[in-house]
Amino acid sequence: MDFFNSKLIRREYECHGKIGLISIMASSDKIIVGSGDVGNVMVSYTECPGKHEYVLTEQDGTLTLERKPITSFLWAIWQPFIDNGIRVTVPGGFNGVLGIKSSSGRISVSGTDPERVNIECSSGAVAVENVNTGRLSITTSSGAVKVTDVQSGSDISVGCSSGMIALINTTVAKDVSVGNHSGLIRMLNVSAGGSLIAGNRSGGIHFDSLKTGGNIDLSTNSGAIRGTIIGRESDYSIISHTTSGHNGLINSRTGEKQLNASATSGAIRISFWE
């Protein structure tokens, strides 16, 4: 296939040994990571010689794929529309570390059980689904983040500057931390063995069937805080405040766990059920 008088080449690479760390540093790429019927970690990607190239290395159990600087302005515009993207397929027993850093492009991780996942994205949606991991860390400047059917043996941290954050059917052994500057925070069937912190500058915090073994801290400058917590209201010492909007909580000092809920502009509606 010719592209602005240049050849597009689809490359595939199969690792030679056991991989404990996968590191991907790319730009304007769709990055898809998942498990498959393979014996070793496999990577496939598209290059355009002289315009869009990568450096791939495998050394001491580490696989690194890094994009070279783009030299063509036209390629920088059109490259995100190429459907192939970067695909990483890991064996079913892969339990290494996964690190992904992208300046622009959708990132998807699914159906694998890495020891740790770290994702950094400047502009692009991030989806993590059906993953059993240790620590999960996601940061994105612009783009939605969706975490679905995830088990974490440690903690989860999600940060977003602009875009919705959704945590669905997620169980965490320790703590959950969610921060957003602009966009809704949505949590459904989230269970944390430790504490949960969710902060939003511009946007609501909505949750259903939230369960924690520790404290809960919810705060937003603009938007409602509403949802259901599994447990009794008497389990919590409650400190709540809203400057503009209805507050359905009654402050108290009776419970062993702390529930803080504050909104500058927005209602607070939280209910409890066992």
Image (cartoon, rainbow, N blue to C red):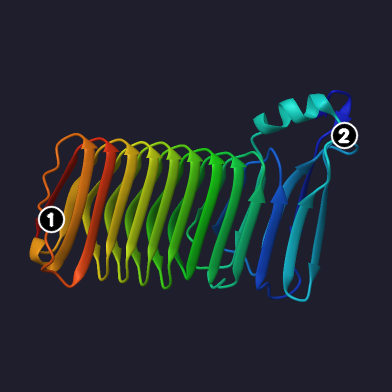
Per the model, the C-alpha gap separating discs 2 and 1 is: 60 Å
Q: Is residue 248 left or right of residue 33?
A: left
Residue 18: percent from left, percent from top: 69, 75
Q: Nearer the viewer, residue 97 or 91?
A: 97
Disc 2 on helix, strand or loop? Answer: loop
Quadrant of the snapshot with the N terminus: top right
* Disc 2 residue type (three-letter): Thr
Q: Where on the picture, by quarter, is residue 63?
A: bottom right
Residue topped by disc 2: 71
Give the label, 2 or 1, closer to the camera.
1
Quadrant of the snapshot with the C terminus: bottom left
Residue at 67% from the left image edge and 32% from the top image edge: 80
**Mark sitting earlier along the chain (2/1):** 2
| Mark 1 surroundings: few (<14), some (14-19) or many (≥20) residues within 10 A | some
Residue topped by disc 1: 251
Where 107 sits versus 24, above or below?
Answer: above
Q: Is residue 239 left or right of residue 12?
A: left
